[in-house]
């Protein structure tokens, strides 16, 4: 048996405790448990008292069948709870703790190592288990990051499925080929991952110019770069487009651009316009009906959306779905238009082009990429027919974690 | 007959519009357009570039999909109004603009008024039409803010449907009564609004005591205050809980708290706790399987989520679904626990308890409210049985806007 260390922790100023209370509790509040690493190459593991107590693994505190914490402790959590005695059994690889509230806990080494608070370990966990790090690309790099997957493999092989989802998470785009020319391809793919995301347009949608019987040259207009459904707070995460028939005319070419890359260029080269696109809320809207369901969707959000750490989390862009209502002060209007024109120009400059063929399923991150297509001529003999559907990132990442075996060993659960 | 009367009314109106009711407009600073609906009225100012972008002619605007089709790949943001003309003769007054790109646009006064850049007009558009303003409440106020609606009336009358959804948007909770005791109620109700939001647990879910359940809610133990599915980036918005069988035992009571009210208290009285709870990212998770399919959901977010203006957008709270992984620097941990413990204490002290009856449908905002229930005992003859489903706010607000505009065909 070895003693685990205790160490003073330079804590952030403690919460608003009364002065005397604070004095009395000072030592307890600022202590952490240091567990020696058996491998001399590695840093010792460090854990705050309160976190260890909160995550006690005994049957009173933790319910293995739900893999979750039992809530009773929190009915009246004593945040001054602290370690009375601690020891390490190196042979059994267990840390034992006796607590000031009379409770006793034990923690397996592997479980602790996985949750070590060092910056390096936390970074590792987020990359491996939470969400893979995204790699941004410009249109010129498209050939280098482009990767093809095969429908039959995705349906039968978990490894292929995992590689597809991982590639989609990192680069935001992946092409699936050799899918049958059947109507249920997207459903089969979605079910492999989890389930489809339903929208006001239903679960699946059909993109097709519908020529009249005697229409010889139906011109299907070009569709400029956009994200799908920016008028939802909960934007559909991944768009899947299955080409059933492709136009033989020179048009109907897919356009794709990594709008996070475009945002990064704007941040570097046009910081003021970047700020404007991050801070000006735009009204995105869609009014209409699909079957009996009438809708009037509106969501107000900037074009470039950042999280609290300044990372890109979502792009909104659609010329048709931008409302004529623009609920910002007058003086913010012109700067926004100028910034937006830069964004649109850069997105074009950094877009790539390719043309899918029947049996292709183009899959891409709808929070991040903008997509479009060039105009095409449709005739009775020359039709373009694309089926579409969405899956949410919550569901994709969950599947990816399961496939990567993140939660399968008891140590990580 | 009716058309004739309308014609007369219009004729009378235009006859009474003398000179002082005339619309006028001028170009300001070379780029903006100032419109004076009548001679004495306050002018409305519109940015020229915005007007050009919103030209309603068939070249720039697609009527049937009601959307812009202007070619932005060649849009010149330096476009300027060259000359203006106003027309009073039409049923609605119009502004006609000649642009530096040789284009001409035409806007009706009503269209312009509805899009006024005046702050007051924008605020009322947002509050009346975009999303109603929320009103926060303490547990003691619950009886005065909680409204009851008849399930049958909600299903049959659009006006009652609107009131229910409005009440849900403003207060975050509303109770429907008198629903039948079949399992299709939550689906019919959801389809009256739009459609059910599916989650890892399917579309409808049943809450009943299941020994050995993989989800904590499916046990008869007390279920402390929490929000559902905090481990989703796209958290389901509104919880619909249909009470089919209520326990006759003591317990099984619902607990509800307006967590936005708790956040108000923290912001006012404990700013440091508020700051921490709105900044420190917490790992929320759920690992398990449903219908033979494994899942592993994780979402990292603070307990109190704020938008760029500091308004509450979401509260996350669940003791069982908080991950043992806590990806913050060591020094953040202890202070965060103290702040979170304060939040939990305040919420518990403020919780309002009541017990739904068979036929009740409890609906509440899962983004904002915490809910829980007291423990209960099932017997062979009497076992508590609740059917639940979710609706998303995107879908509810959309329905509310359609109802406010008076029907769907507009």
Image (spheres, rainbow, N blue to C red):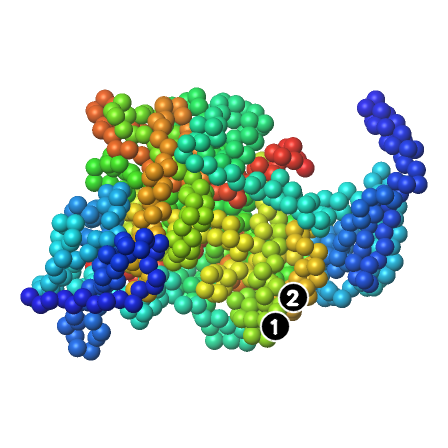
Q: Quadrant of the C terminus of chain B?
A: top right
In front of the other: A221 or B333: B333
Residue at left 86%, top 28%? B9
Q: Residues within 10 Å of mark 2 (few under 14, many from 20)?
A: many
Pointer 1 and pointer 2 on the same chain: yes
Label 1: which residue? A270
* Residue placed furthest toward the front: A20
Q: Position of residue A31 (x, y in %)?
A: 23, 63
Residue B1 against residue B162 in the figure, above or below? above
Left/right placement of residue A38 relative to residue B328 reads left
Q: Quadrant of residue A301?
A: bottom right
**Going 30% across and 45% down the picture, which residue do you hit?**
B290
Badge 1 vs badge 2, beta-carbon distance below 8 Å: yes
Q: Is residue B288 visible?
A: yes
Residue B2 versus residue B223 in the image, above or below: above
Residue B326 lies, in percent from the top left, at 31, 59
Q: Chain of mark 2?
A: A
Which quarter of the image is occupied by the N terminus of chain B? top right
Name the residue tied to disc 2.
A339
Q: Indicate the quadrant where residue A115 lies.
A: bottom left
Which residue is at a point 33% across and 59% down the rendered structure image? Answer: A14
Q: Residue at x 40, y 55 (%)?
A: B272
Q: Seen in the image, is A271 located left or right of residue A130?
A: right
Residue A147: horizontal and vertical position, in percent?
A: 44, 69
List x then y, in percent, for residue B189.
47, 31
- Give the mark nearer the N terminus: 1 vs 2: 1
* Foreground residue among B143 and A301: B143
Q: Is residue A287 left or right of residue B61?
A: left
């Amino acid at each position: 048996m070895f003693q685990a260390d205790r160490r003073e922790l330079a804590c952030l100023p403690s919460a608003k405790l009364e002065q005397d209370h604070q004095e009395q509790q000072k030592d307890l509040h600022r202590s952490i448990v240091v567990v020696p690493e058996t491998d001399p190459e590695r840093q010792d593991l460090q854990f705050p008292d309160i976190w260890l107590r909160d995550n006690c693994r005994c049957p009173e505190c933790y319910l293995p069948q739900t893999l979750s914490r039992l809530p009773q402790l929190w009915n009246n959590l004593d945040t001054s709870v602290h370690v009375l005695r601690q020891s390490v059994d190196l042979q059994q690889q267990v840390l034992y703790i006796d607590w000031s509230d009379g409770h006793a806990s034990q923690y397996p080494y592997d479980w602790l190592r996985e949750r070590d608070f060092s910056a390096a370990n936390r970074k590792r966990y987020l990359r491996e288990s939470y969400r893979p790090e995204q790699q941004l690309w410009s249109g010129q790099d498209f050939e280098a990051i482009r990767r093809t997957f095969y429908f039959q493999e995705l349906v039968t092989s978990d490894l292929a499925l995992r590689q597809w989802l991982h590639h989609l998470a990192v680069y935001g785009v992946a092409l699936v080929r050799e899918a049958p020319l059947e109507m249920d391809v997207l459903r089969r793919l979605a079910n492999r991952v989890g389930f489809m995301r339903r929208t006001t347009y239903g679960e699946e949608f059909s993109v097709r110019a519908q020529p009249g019987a005697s229409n010889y040259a139906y011109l299907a207009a070009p569709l400029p770069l956009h994200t799908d459904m920016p008028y939802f707070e909960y934007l559909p995460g991944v768009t899947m487009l299955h080409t059933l028939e492709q136009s033989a005319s020179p048009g109907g070419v897919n356009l794709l651009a990594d709008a996070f890359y475009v945002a990064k260029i704007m941040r570097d080269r046009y910081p003021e316009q970047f700020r404007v696109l991050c801070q000006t809320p735009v009204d995105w809207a869609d009014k209409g009906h699909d079957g009996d369901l009438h809708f009037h969707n509106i969501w107000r959000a900037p074009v470039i959306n950042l999280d609290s750490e300044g990372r890109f989390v979502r792009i909104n862009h659609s010329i048709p779905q931008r409302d004529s209502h623009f609920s910002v002060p007058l003086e913010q209007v012109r700067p926004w238009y100028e910034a937006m024109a830069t964004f649109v120009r850069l997105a074009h400059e950094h877009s790539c082009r390719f043309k899918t063929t029947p049996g292709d399923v183009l899959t891409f991150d709808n929070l991040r990429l903008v997509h479009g297509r060039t105009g095409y001529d449709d005739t009775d003999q020359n039709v373009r027919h694309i089926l579409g559907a969405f899956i949410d990132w919550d569901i994709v990442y969950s599947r990816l974690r399961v496939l990567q075996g993140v939660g399968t060993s008891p140590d990580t659960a | 007959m009716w058309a004739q009367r309308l014609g007369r009314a219009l004729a009378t109106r235009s006859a009474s519009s003398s000179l002082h009711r005339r619309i006028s407009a001028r170009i300001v600073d070379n780029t903006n357009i100032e419109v004076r609906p009548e001679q004495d009225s306050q002018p409305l100012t519109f940015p020229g570039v915005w007007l050009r972008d919103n030209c309603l002619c068939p070249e720039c605007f697609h009527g049937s999909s009601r959307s812009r089709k202007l070619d932005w790949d060649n849009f010149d943001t330096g476009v300027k109004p060259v000359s203006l003309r106003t027309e009073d003769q039409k049923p609605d007054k119009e502004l006609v603009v000649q642009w530096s790109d040789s284009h001409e646009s035409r806007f009706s006064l009503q269209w312009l008024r509805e899009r006024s850049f005046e702050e007051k007009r924008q605020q009322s558009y947002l509050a009346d039409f975009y999303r109603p303003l929320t009103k926060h409440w303490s547990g003691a106020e619950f009886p005065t803010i909680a409204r009851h609606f008849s399930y049958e009336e909600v299903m049959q009358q659009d006006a009652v449907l609107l009131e229910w959804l409005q009440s849900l948007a403003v207060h975050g909770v509303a109770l429907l009564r008198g629903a039948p005791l079949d399992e299709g109620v939550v689906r019919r109700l959801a389809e009256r609004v739009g459609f059910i939001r599916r989650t890892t647990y399917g579309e409808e879910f049943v809450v009943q005591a299941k020994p050995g359940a993989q989800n904590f809610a499916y046990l008869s133990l007390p279920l402390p205050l929490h929000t559902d599915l905090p481990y989703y980036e796209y958290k389901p918005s509104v919880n619909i809980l249909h009470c089919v069988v209520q326990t006759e035992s003591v317990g099984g009571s619902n607990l509800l708290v307006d967590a936005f009210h708790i956040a108000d208290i923290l912001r006012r009285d404990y700013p440091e706790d508020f700051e921490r709870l709105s900044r420190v990212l917490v790992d929320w998770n759920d690992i398990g399987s449903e219908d033979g399919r494994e899942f592993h959901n994780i979402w990292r977010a603070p307990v109190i989520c704020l938008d760029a203006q500091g308004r509450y957008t979401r509260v996350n709270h669940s003791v069982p679904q908080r991950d043992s992984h806590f990806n913050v620097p060591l020094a953040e941990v202890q202070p965060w626990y103290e702040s979170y413990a304060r939040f939990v204490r305040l919420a518990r002290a403020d919780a309002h308890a009541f017990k739904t009856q068979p036929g009740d449908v409890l609906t509440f905002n899962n983004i904002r409210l915490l809910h829980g229930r007291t423990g209960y005992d099932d017997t062979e003859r009497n076992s508590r049985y609740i059917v639940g489903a979710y609706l998303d706010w995107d879908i509810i607000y959309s329905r509310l806007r359609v109802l406010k505009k008076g029907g769907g065909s507009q």
